[in-house]
Image: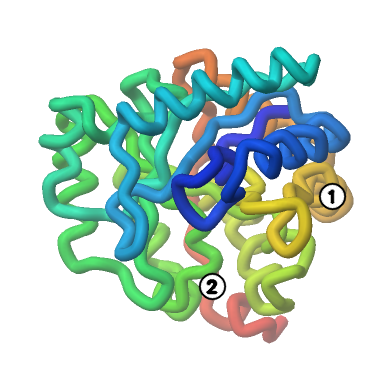
Amino acid sequence: MIDLHCHILPGLDDGPKTIEESVEMARRAIEEGITEIVATPHHKHPTYSNEASIVRETVIELNKRLREENLDLKIHPGQEVRLYGEVVEDLTTKTTITLADHEMYLFIEFPSNHVPRYAAQLFYQLQLNGYTPIIVHPERNSKLLENPDKLYDFVQNGALTQVTSSSLTGHFGKKIKQFSNQLIEANLTHFVASDAHNVDSRPFRLRESYAEIAQKHGEEKVRYFQENAQLIVENKHVFVEPPEQIRRKKLLGIF
């Protein structure tokens, strides 16, 4: 398995503070069956900002340590980018980087309680410059939960999304779990990733989430998500199914 969203790099954000803690996370990842991780520290976050050079250097150091520990896990560079106005310019100057440093897909984070008004225009500019924005954990955004048509519009216009494994396992609550499954049903999400920060309160749960998906949506949907993650690290175009709108009465759980 490949995990596209993980805060495994030491000392950069609210993930592990030491490289020893990062190594422990790596051990847990291997136990889950994870073979590759895209490290995605926060960037342009109100509290954390990690430019590309720092991320790349820390990835090299961690990969070196994992080899010394004989741990068969490969780390790729990436960022979880809080949406900001100069993102296109910073991608051009290489201070902001794409997933696995492959110049194609970019993780974009919204604030948890709103969607910036300029998001659609900025997504359009990103796409004009050859980048595909991937909205991370949309199921945990209160405005998208209230108005899933807004997410549908983003996806219809070429953006992709990534749901968190712990959302699917119910660790963020029943409402978010339900919405996550509705996003899968409506082809409004394209990746599942852990967003792991540690081995205790924010672990991987990736294998568990895929088991949930298999039970509710079938093994073919599991393969879809796993193959898309593989295509990201291979610098290839991912599979995208036509999105559907979520009916309001269904969103409220009334059938």
Q: Residue at x 20, y 54 (%)?
A: 84
- Measured Cα–Cα span from mark 2 to mark 1: 28 Å
* Label number found at residue 128: none
The answer to whether 103 is drawn above or below residue 96 in the figure is above
Q: Quadrant of the N terminus?
A: top right
Using the rendered view, name the quadrant where residue 68 is placed: top right
- Which sits in the foreground, 127 or 47? 47
In depth, the one of 80 and 185 nearer the eye is 80
**Circle 2 sits on which residue?**
247
Q: Amino acid at mark 2?
A: Arg
Residue behind mark 1: 208
Mark 2 falls on what kind of element? loop
- Quadrant assignment for the C terminus: bottom right
Residue 153 visible at all: no
Q: Position of residue 77 (x, y in %)?
A: 46, 27
User: Which residue appears at 76% of the width and 39% of the height?
Assistant: 24
Mark 2, Cα crowd under 10 Å, few <14 / some 14-19 / many 20+, is few
